[in-house]
Image (cartoon, rainbow, N blue to C red):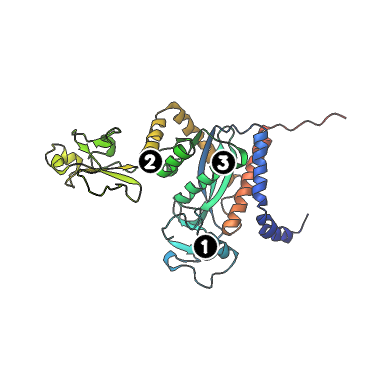
């Protein structure tokens, strides 16, 4: 056996330069495909928080930034991924705190426990036997996890030629742009709850109470009046699309003033407005799928990826990282996913019996 220092030097050098651990993981996926454990018809995706190997107190406020004395391999790796959509460029929001030991780890309070620094391991699994077909390390924010989902789907198609018919995920992946990417760009059915904030708690009419007329491109309110993009003609045509990709439909002021339902519709505004995403077609498709029996089956199957995360933390004991930096997290996640696939192979595929002497 080589000395541990030899493995350490190779891990920081040749192993990462050649992407050896990624190749090792993909070998386990290829073996599972060869043994027909991967159906390729339905995938599920999810992310789980893994604690970083840092001390909570050794940190500075996020708006202050890293001090000049912060040095080390993990700091250099953090600076390298500042423009990566899975890490520094995932969101324009400044993190609340930055750890000096491992700046790429994210301060998160997403669990019921006290806030801690973490990375996210993202799994893309096949629903037949819960084989992990891809894994990605990201910072612990929703936007980064959605980016990881896209990378894993595209990489799986390029590497193994697998094109799933449906993708199962939770509401964190139900944003309008992501649903549109799945439906329009990838032709994948989204068995995903739609991320929607149009519901109201004050008893007034919600957007769902307004009927959209596709032919006229307008909404019909409960009072029978129409809401349009514009109620007057402009000499210079306007796009009518906001920066967030939403279209506003407005009612006429005189219609709302004389309406008997005004107090239930727009009690605090002179006229009612309704917003519609430019990707509403994909959102409507996801809503229609949510009413089918196949969606109920997908909801039950999604627990398979959650069970893999439970196995990762309770059996493999990877509830806290031992390595630091984005590369260290990536190495551990690849090795853990490879180990889980090998355990799956050993459990399902019987060992060949030796021939008698």
Residue 175 visible in this rendered orientation of the protein: no
Decide: is 206 above or below 114: above
Q: State the residue at coordinates (55%, 44%).
A: 152
Report whether 53 appears left or right of 345. left
Q: Quadrant of residue 204?
A: top left
Decide: is 27 above or below 320: above
Mark 1 or 3: in front is 1
Mark 2 or 1: in front is 2
The N terminus: image quadrant:
bottom right
Residue at the extreme top of the image, as rendered: 293
Instruction: Please give the residue where the numbered disc 3 appears in the rendered image.
Output: 308
Q: Secondary structure at mark 2?
A: loop
Instruction: Please give the residue where the numbered disc 1 appears in the rendered image.
Output: 103
The C terminus: image quadrant:
top right
Mark 1 is surrounded, within 10 Å at the Cα level, by few (under 14), some (14 to 19) or many (20 or more) other residues, namely: many
Task: Please state which of residues 233 and 275 is positioned toward the viewer in this rendering.
Answer: 233
Q: State the residue at coordinates (67%, 42%).
A: 27
Q: Earlier in the sequence, mark 1 or mark 3?
A: 1
Q: Secondary structure at mark 3?
A: helix
Instruction: Please give the residue where the numbered disc 2 appears in the rendered image.
Output: 279
């Amino acid at each position: 056996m080589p000395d541990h220092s030899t493995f350490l030097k190779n891990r920081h050098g040749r192993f990462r330069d050649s992407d050896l651990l990624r190749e090792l993981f993909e070998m386990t996926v290829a073996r599972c495909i060869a043994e027909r454990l991967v159906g390729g018809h339905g995938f599920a995706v999810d992310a789980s928080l893994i604690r970083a190997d840092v001390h909570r107190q050794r940190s500075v406020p996020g708006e202050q930034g890293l001090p000049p004395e912060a040095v080390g391999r993990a700091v250099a790796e953090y600076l390298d991924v500042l423009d990566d959509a899975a890490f520094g460029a995932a969101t324009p929001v400044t993190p609340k705190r930055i750890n000096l030991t491992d700046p790429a780890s994210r301060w998160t309070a997403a669990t019921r426990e006290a806030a801690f620094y973490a990375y996210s391991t993202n799994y893309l699994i096949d629903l037949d036997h819960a084989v992990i077909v891809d894994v990605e390390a990201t910072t612990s924010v929703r936007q980064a996890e959605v980016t990881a989902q896209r990378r894993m789907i595209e990489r799986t198609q390029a590497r193994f030629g697998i094109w799933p018919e449906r993708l199962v995920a939770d509401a964190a992946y139900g944003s309008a742009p992501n649903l549109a990417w799945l439906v329009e760009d990838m032709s994948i059915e989204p068995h995903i709850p739609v991320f929607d904030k149009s519901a109201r708690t004050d008893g007034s009419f919600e957007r769902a109470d307004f009927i959209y007329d596709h032919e006229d491109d307008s909404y019909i309110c409960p009072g029978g009046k129409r809401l349009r993009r514009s109620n007057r003609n402009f000499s210079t045509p306007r796009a009518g699309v906001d920066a967030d990709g939403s279209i506003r439909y407005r009612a006429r002021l005189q219609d709302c003033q004389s309406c008997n339902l005004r107090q239930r519709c727009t009690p605090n505004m002179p006229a009612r407005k309704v917003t519609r995403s430019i990707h509403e077609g994909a959102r409507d498709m996801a809503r229609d799928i949510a009413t089918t029996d196949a969606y109920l089956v997908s909801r039950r199957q999604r627990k398979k990826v959650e069970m893999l995360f439970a196995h990762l933390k309770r059996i493999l004991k990877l509830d806290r990282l031992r390595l630091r930096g984005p590369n260290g997290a990536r190495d551990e996640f690849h090795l853990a996913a490879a180990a889980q696939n090998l355990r799956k192979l050993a459990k399902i595929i019987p060992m060949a019996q030796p021939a008698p002497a």
